[in-house]
């Protein structure tokens, strides 16, 4: 049996070697490019690896046989009279190990010889090809990084299989071909005729987007397999008729305007297995649904607007759609990006950066990041965030701030994406008013932890109202929920809507922040009562916001700032919960107050369609406007050119001058621009809002000039150009003026007691703060 075993190992080894080395010694054809050599080189490397692995396997087998033999010998020595048998058994085992050891030594010798043969074969092939001597690193000032990249390739080309996929084989020529044709660090090689291409055919006319009337295809695109996807599809079905009615109204408003159909990839990164997908398991257990509500509405809006969509919730699908080469993500994509736009989140953004190589930098202008709480410019700029202490786990992407799209209009630096709430027809509104129970309250909070420590508020509320909750539980009632509360458990969305239609009050206990539920409650005729935060919550004083790429200084003054600032009384009451008398008085007043269902236009389906349509048609982050030269490098032309701004008739601010000639092309149109100077410690967001306007960061470039200070009668003893998210600004106590050096840091957010900021403001459409009056 031992001989058969050894013979079997030898035969297996021989077959393995022949299979692994098959084809390695085939002759190369003259004239093959370095791309052809890839097969032989990779084969050589694999063969050596196979031989080494085979030798290691045999050595490991020998060691295990030795251990087994010793163990067997040790056991049998305790059997008295039978002690002679282990010696008989051990001798064949020792012979077997000797034979295995001999085979291992032979395999090792073969590996050395094959390695030498392959090296000689490859060297002869290089000499025959003649390319090695011809490929010298070019010295071209237009490609200053070429030599350094070639040096890097010499040392690291085996670090990622993607280089071999593109034909890199360790030769100088393959490095230069890759760096000039796949990447763009070296000049094209003269002997590579690929650079002289035939004239490209004229681009095909773009298909025109047409409003869709059937959502069945969208439901197929979303797919199955996750509770989160099922939730989104249920929401889309439930709101389908509302979406279709809105589409008809917007179509009439656009009056047949031509719209190019965009190819759009939607990659929901937080639902991928690689990011953990913590949301799907919690859909049925009271977990947060705000993100999934927003994604469902984004999918519906993009589809109804008539664009071509691809939806992914897995990394493998993302790689396939993008054209990611095999490897570790260091190489560019295998072909031009087939999508005009990519909607994703921070998880998806990280995944794309890891797998797109240099293509990420090339195509990141096409990305739109769905970002619930927003990303302020100070956190987005990598160098600035690192130097000034704004770096977090989620920021420093160096995107245009408007590429981040938020759930609520936190800061105009980002684009306001939003979501939709269910709309009521006139009959439903009348029924709600007739069936309201003035003594019924519903608590905002599906997780039991939100109720902890709220006994005092609940006791006061219980004196006047019947309290209802929708707290998730499996078997036992959560102890955090008092016995006098009628807890319905976690309700399906339509049942929750019915509960809100009966209730008079929807009350929040400070968390969760800025979710969709308060807007849904107000749309169903409830009054929303929430706590005032003093001091306001921010990343500086509250754990929830710490680590997020936004300071939100002074802006989170309540649980739902949008409801407080944009809706207000009588629909929204914000009181100090630490003042029992104020809290109780508010409840009494609310019970006597009659309110109608109310939904801001920007949270209707038509409002969201209108907003997304405008973004797709007008936002272009791949062609950016250049910043005017700084004062130290100002050209004579700039010094002599008049400012396009003029003082307003009442001399309080600047407007776009009617005599400025033809206005520059751009969106929003510059005719909506007004320039105001902030008070110290005020952001531009606050300053514009005080004047009934919205801060518009794309207009900062028109303010970032020395003569604008003079037009506003601001005396400057000196003017400096620096990198600071508060600039342009003036430090009046020392008469120093500052201009912005880095366009990515233009920011509506941020304030300081030292500075008065120059703020670009614009008008907005009624009920639609994201768009100016002429922006549609």
Image (tube, rainbow, N blue to C red):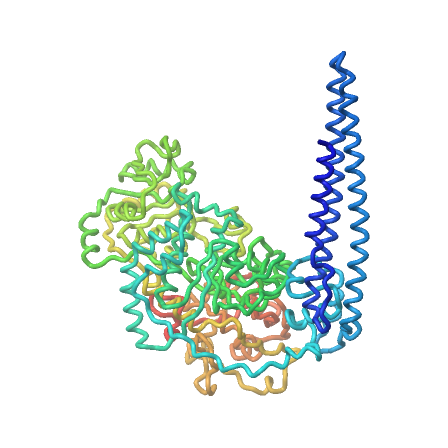
Q: Nearer the viewer, residue 27 or 558?
A: 27
Residue at 66% from the left image edge and 78% from the top image edge? 632
Q: Position of residue 524 (x, y in %)?
A: 27, 52
Q: Position of residue 32 (x, y in %)?
A: 70, 71
Q: Is residue 357 left or right of residue 302?
A: right
Q: Is residue 427 left or right of residue 98?
A: left
Q: Nearer the viewer, residue 57 or 143?
A: 57
Q: Position of residue 138 (x, y in %)?
A: 75, 76
Residue 714, quarter of the rendered image: bottom right
Q: Position of residue 170 (x, y in %)?
A: 74, 64
Can you say whether 69 is above or below 177 in the image? above
Residue 503, quarter of the rendered image: top left
Residue at 47% from the left image edge and 86% from the top image edge? 660
Q: Nearer the viewer, residue 586 or 386?
A: 386
Q: Nearer the viewer, residue 763 or 691?
A: 763
Residue 150, quarter of the rendered image: bottom right
Position of the C terminus, as image quadrant, is bottom left
């Amino acid at each position: 049996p031992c001989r058969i075993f050894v013979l079997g190992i030898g035969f297996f080894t021989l077959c393995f070697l022949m299979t692994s080395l098959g084809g390695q010694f085939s002759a190369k054809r003259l004239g093959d490019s370095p791309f052809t050599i890839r097969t032989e080189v990779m084969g050589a490397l694999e063969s050596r690896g196979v031989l080494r692995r085979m030798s290691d396997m045999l050595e490991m087998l020998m060691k295990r046989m030795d251990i087994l033999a010793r163990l067997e010998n040790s056991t049998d020595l305790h059997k008295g009279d039978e002690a002679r048998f282990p010696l008989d058994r051990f001798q064949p085992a020792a012979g077997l190990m000797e034979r295995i050891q001999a085979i291992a030594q032979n395999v090792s010798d073969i590996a050395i010889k094959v390695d030498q043969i392959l090296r000689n074969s490859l060297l002869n092939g290089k000499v025959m090809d003649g390319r090695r001597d011809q490929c010298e690193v070019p010295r071209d000032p237009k490609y200053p990084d070429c030599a350094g990249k070639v040096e890097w390739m010499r040392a690291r080309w085996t670090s990622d299989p993607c280089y071999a996929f593109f034909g890199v084989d360790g030769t100088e020529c393959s490095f230069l071909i890759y760096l000039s044709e796949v990447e763009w660090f070296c000049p094209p090689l003269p002997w590579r005729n690929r650079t002289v291409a035939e004239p490209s055919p004229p681009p095909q006319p773009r298909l025109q987007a047409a409003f869709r009337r059937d959502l069945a295809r969208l439901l197929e695109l979303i797919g199955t397999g996750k509770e989160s996807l099922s939730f989104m599809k249920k929401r889309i079905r439930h709101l389908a008729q509302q979406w279709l009615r809105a589409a008809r109204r917007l179509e009439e408003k656009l009056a047949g305007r031509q719209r190019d159909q965009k190819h759009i990839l939607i990659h929901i990164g937080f639902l991928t297995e690689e990011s953990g997908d913590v949301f799907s398991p919690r859909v049925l257990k009271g977990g947060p649904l705000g993100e999934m509500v927003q994604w469902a509405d984004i999918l519906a809006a993009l589809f109804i607007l008539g664009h071509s969509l691809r939806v992914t919730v897995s990394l493998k699908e993302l790689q396939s759609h993008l054209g990611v080469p095999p490897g570790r993500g260091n190489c560019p994509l295998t072909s031009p990006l087939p999508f005009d736009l990519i909607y994703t989140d921070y998880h998806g953004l990280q995944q794309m950066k890891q797998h797109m190589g240099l293509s990420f930098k090339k195509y990141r202008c096409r990305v739109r990041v769905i970002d619930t709480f927003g990303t302020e410019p100070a956190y987005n700029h990598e160098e600035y965030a690192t130097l000034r202490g704004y770096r977090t786990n989620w920021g420093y992407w160096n995107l245009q701030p408007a590429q981040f799209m938020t759930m609520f209009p936190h800061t105009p630096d980002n684009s306001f994406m939003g979501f939709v709430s269910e709309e009521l027809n006139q009959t439903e509104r009348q029924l709600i008013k007739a069936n309201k129970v003035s003594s019924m309250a519903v608590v905002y909070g599906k997780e039991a932890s939100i109720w902890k420590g709220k006994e005092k508020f609940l006791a006061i509320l219980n004196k006047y109202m019947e309290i209802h909750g929708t707290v998730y539980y499996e078997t036992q009632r959560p102890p955090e929920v008092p016995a006098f509360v009628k807890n319905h458990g976690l309700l399906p969305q339509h049942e929750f809507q019915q509960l809100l239609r009966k209730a008079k009050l929807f009350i929040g206990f400070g968390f969760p922040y800025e979710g969709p539920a308060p807007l849904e409650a107000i749309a169903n005729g409830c009054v929303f009562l929430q706590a005032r935060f003093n001091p306001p919550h921010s990343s500086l004083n509250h754990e929830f916001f710490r680590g997020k790429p936004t300071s939100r200084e002074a802006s989170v003054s309540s649980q739902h700032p949008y409801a407080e600032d944009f809706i207000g009384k009588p629909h929204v009451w914000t009181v100090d919960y630490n003042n029992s008398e104020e809290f109780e008085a508010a409840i009494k007043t609310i019970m006597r107050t009659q309110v109608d269902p109310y939904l801001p236009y920007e949270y209707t389906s038509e409002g969201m369609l209108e907003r997304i349509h405008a973004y797709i048609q007008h936002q272009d982050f791949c062609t950016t406007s250049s910043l005017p030269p700084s004062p130290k490098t100002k050209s004579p032309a700039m010094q002599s050119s008049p400012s396009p701004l003029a003082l307003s008739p009442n001399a309080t601010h600047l407007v776009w001058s009617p005599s400025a000639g033809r206005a520059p092309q751009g969106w929003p149109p510059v005719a909506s621009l007004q320039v105001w100077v902030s008070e110290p410690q005020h952001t531009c967001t606050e300053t514009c809002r005080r004047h009934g306007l919205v801060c518009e960061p794309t207009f900062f470039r028109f303010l970032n000039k020395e003569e604008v200070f003079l037009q506003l009668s601001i005396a400057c003893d000196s003017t400096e150009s620096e990198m600071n998210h508060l600039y342009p600004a003036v430090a009046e106590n020392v008469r120093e003026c500052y201009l912005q050096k880095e366009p990515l840091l233009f920011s509506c957010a941020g304030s300081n007691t030292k500075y008065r900021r120059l703020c670009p403001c614009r008008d907005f459409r009624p009920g639609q703060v994201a768009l100016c009056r002429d922006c549609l």
